[in-house]
Amino acid sequence: MYDSNMSVTVALSKSPAELGTLATQFKALGDPTRLDLMMNVATSADSEACVCDLTPDTGLTQGTVSHHLRILVEAGLLNRDQRGKWSYYSLTDSAKNILSSLNLSISSNKTKSSSC
């Protein structure tokens, strides 16, 4: 049922490259694990999370979590910053726009703590 109070505006260009990028991003977000990881990054303190902080809640190995994060980086949804042996992830502007267009909040109530 359509809710007239909910308004979402999506502006698409007809550029095949831009449409291809958007399709890749939606494909990456179509996996529940990747969507959950991106939402965890979005709600982390400073909207940034280390792979070591993201792994415990998934029930997956660190290697599997890193694989999903790599797909999100390749899709242009997460930035990756290497600090020593750990990788830290943050949302790209594109990811913020997608979450905003879906009316998903990206505010954080978490305090910064790392198990790295």
Image (tube, grey):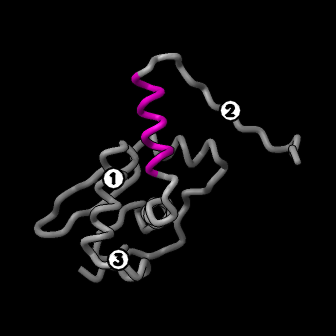
For the residues marked 1 and 2, what is the alpha-carbon distance in whole angstroms? 26 Å
Circles 1 and 2: CB atoms closer than 8 Å: no
Q: In the displayed structure, would residue 76 be above or below residue 88?
A: above
* Position of residue 61 in the picture relative to residue 29 (left or right): left
Query: Which residue is disc 3 drawn over?
Result: 55
Answer whether residue 26 is magenta in the image: yes
Q: Name the residue under label 1.
A: 71
Q: What is the three-letter code of the residue carrying label 2?
A: Thr
Identity of the residue drawn at 28% across and 65% down: 66
Residue type, mark 3 in image: Thr
The percent coordinates of residue 15 (x first, y second) are: 46, 17
Which secondary structure lies at badge 2? loop
Using the rendered view, name the quadrant where residue 6 is placed: top right
Q: Is residue 53 above or below residue 95?
A: below
User: x%, y% of residue 107?
Assistant: 55, 60
Picture coordinates of residue 56, whole percent (x, y) = 37, 82
Mark 3 neighbour density, 10 Å: few (under 14) some (14–19) many (20 or more): some
The answer to which of 82 and 76 lies nearer the viewer is 76
